[in-house]
Amino acid sequence: MTPLRICLIASSRYPVNQPFAGGLESLTHQLAGELVDRGHEVTLFAAPGSDPALPVAELDVHGIRFSSTALRDVHAPSEEWMTDHHAYLSLMLDLARSGSRRFDVVHNNSLHHLPIAMSEMLDIPVLTTLHTPPTPWLESAMAASAVPVHCTAVSRSSAAAWRHVVDATVVHNGVAIDRWEPGPGGRSAMWTGRLVTEKAPHLAIDAARLAGIPLVLAGPAPDPDYFAREVEPRLGGDVTYAGHLDHPRLAELVARSAVAVVTPAWEEPFGLVAIESMACGTPVAALARGALPEIVAEGTGALTSGDRPNDLAAAIVRSLTCDRRAVRDHVVRHFSARRMVDAYEERYAGLLVRSSAA
């Protein structure tokens, strides 16, 4: 593909850097790096503190100090909300003024509504990847747009959830296969991700104990109330918390685990932790919610349709019989970062052809 000048928009709140705040930041890092390796000229608009090895332009999160009078307004949103608003408003106005001279395509990988709402001001095509179930602010931005909103969804499940708003092409997330290397497995299960209510790590703890297998938890704990109420009292003995790990240490932990437990308490849009685990050969025991049935195929783990600890414990035991080589091969064939970026390049090309014909 002819090299493109790509504006890649990320989160204004969480740096695209290790240890990653979540799957979105990890995925954006992979995407930016792979695009650069393919010869594209990428500018990643991201939060301060993002990886300096990437071509980062920091979003303007510190560009305005709100007056005390404005912040005292009875209808004023939180200062954090206003900071995000200012960062994306500044970026989109800048792109409206001069973006067509600097970029061929904009890829919106954020969760904010303004890159969609203001896209019709730009003279360059905009592609938005939908990483979450529908939200009111994104639905509003799409409904108000006077031009077609071009979207991809990270799974068939997610595309179906958005279908009443937009017809999104499916581009499954991918992992850098060479960074998640196969490992020997071990005697412990593991759980990784954000320790928050919608990820339900407490269910993984209860299920692992019922299955009679030790469990190691890893990831950030951004909700201290949930952690103190549901996770901390369950720690000890056969359950340990390893903290928030960078990818090399996390990949080592995953590769030396017997099974990865995935416990979404919501309709999981994708489940990046599942394919990261399987890339290491580690099978997955998971709740069959959202996209996980698209990811965890027969022979790569076990799913349960219920959310009872007993059901998940049985899935953990079934997963232990999977062939680790077959588990990794499934990800190599279907969920590599290379395959993901091939699909995005195809989408960029299609948007450019459509734009030139308009």
Image (tube, rainbow, N blue to C red):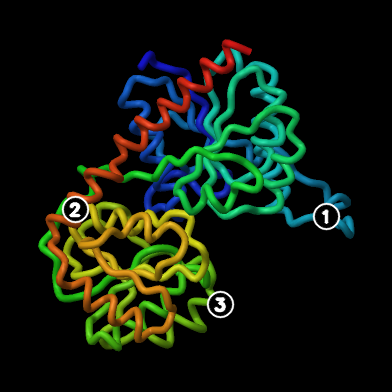
Q: Which residue is mark 1?
A: 76
Question: Callout 1, which amino acid?
Answer: Ala
Residue 58 at least partly seen: no
Question: Callout 2, which amino acid?
Answer: Arg
Please name whichever residue, 86 or 68, is drawn nearer the observer in this view of the structure.
86
- How many residues crowd mark 2 within 10 Å: few (<14), some (14–19), many (20+)? many
Where residue 184 appears, as percent x and y from the top left, is 10, 62
The quadrant of the image that shows the C terminus is top right
Q: Residue 225 bears which disc, if any?
A: 3
Question: Callout 3, which amino acid?
Answer: Asp
Disc 1 to disc 3: CB gap under 8 Å: no
Please say if 147 is above or below 137: above
Which circle, 1 or 2, is nearer the viewer? 2
Mark earlier in primary sequence (1, 2)? 1
The quadrant of the image that shows the N terminus is top left
Where residue 315 appears, as percent x and y from the top left, is 29, 76
SS at circle 1 = loop
> In which image quadrant can residue 192 be found?
bottom left
- How many residues crowd mark 1 within 10 Å: few (<14), some (14–19), many (20+)? few
Q: Residue 328 bears which disc, if any?
A: 2
> In which image quadrant can residue 150 be found?
top right
Q: Is residue 232 left or right of residue 65?
A: left
Give the alpha-carbon distance from disc 2 to disc 3, as whole Å.
Answer: 36 Å
Mark earlier in primary sequence (1, 3)? 1
SS at circle 2 = helix
> In which image quadrant can residue 213 be found?
bottom left
Please name whichever residue, 83 or 297, is drawn nearer the observer in this view of the structure.
297
Residue 169 at least partly seen: yes
Mark earlier in primary sequence (2, 3)? 3
